[in-house]
Amino acid sequence: MRFILTLLLVVLGVVCRVAPHPWNFAPVGAIALFAGATFDNRRAAFAVPLLTMFLGDLFIGLHSLMPVIYATYALIVALGIRLRARRRSPVAVGGAAFASATIFFVVTNFAVWLSGMTYPKTFDGLVACYAAAIPFFDRTLASDLMFSAIFFGALALAERYVPALAVSKHR
């Protein structure tokens, strides 16, 4: 029953990704964090956000940086697994959401610069790449914080009112 609840929350996130939305305002980072922190099956924790991305990319379009982006989401799942080992307080979830947005920003923009498609492979090119990406970071951060609050908050409420959903503290 717990897996079904978490899967339903993720399906909501998938729908949000393929629906029209502002650039970099999507639930995938929160899905990856949530899956890592809550799914009992680690394979599913990694598969769900990656499948979410792939299915969305089939509609939105495939591109050369997909492997880096997918690897970044896998790293965010690992961050979620680390969060799982701790008490999932609002502060811990918020900190993890901030870290996931930052990881995504740093890694994916480094890959854009490294590709050499848009920016020269110089220090100035690297600075220009990150500077051009700053307007998108606030959207990534806002979406990771908002969707993490929704996913983790909904699960916390469900666990509170349906005790069978709560994870045993003796596991």
Image: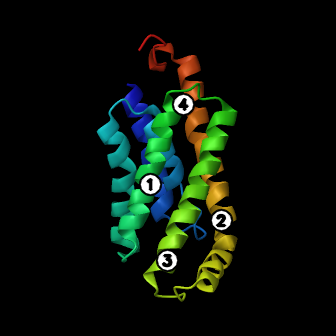
Answer few, some or many: residues within 10 Å of disc 1's Cα (few below 14, many 20 plus, some between 14 and 19): many
Give whichever of 104, 61 is nearer the camera: 104
Instruction: Please state the horizontal and vertical placement of residue 31, each as a whole percent of the image.
Output: 48, 47
Give the mark toward the camera: 3 or 2: 3
Which mark sits nearer the N-terminus, 3 or 2? 3
Instruction: Please state the horizontal and vertical placement of residue 163, each as a whole percent of the image.
Output: 50, 14
Residue under numbered circle 2: 137
Res. 62 image quadrant: bottom left
Instruction: Please state the horizontal and vertical placement of residue 42, each as a whole percent of the image.
Output: 34, 36
Q: Taking the image as drawn, is residue 108 in sight?
A: yes
Tell which residue pokes out farthest to the left in this image.
43
Q: Cβ–Cβ below 8 Å for labels 1 and 2?
A: no
Measured in 3D between alpha carbons, the distance from the residue under mark 2 to the one under mark 4, in whole angstroms, is 27 Å
Measured in 3D between alpha carbons, the distance from the residue under mark 3 to the one under mark 2, in whole angstroms, is 15 Å
Which mark sits nearer the N-terminus, 1 or 2? 1
Measured in 3D between alpha carbons, the distance from the residue under mark 4 to the one under mark 1, in whole angstroms, is 21 Å
Residue found at x 45% / y 58%: 72
Q: Amino acid at mark 2?
A: Phe
Measured in 3D between alpha carbons, the distance from the residue under mark 1 to the one under mark 2, in whole angstroms, is 16 Å
Residue found at x 40% / y 66%: 68
* Disc 2 secondary structure class: helix
* Disc 4 secondary structure class: helix
Q: Which mark is residue 155?
A: 4
Q: Amino acid at mark 1?
A: Tyr
Residue under numbered circle 3: 112
Which mark sits nearer the N-terminus, 2 or 4? 2
Q: Amino acid at mark 3?
A: Val
Res. 51 image quadrant: bottom left
Residue under numbered circle 1: 73
Which mark sits nearer the N-terminus, 4 or 1? 1
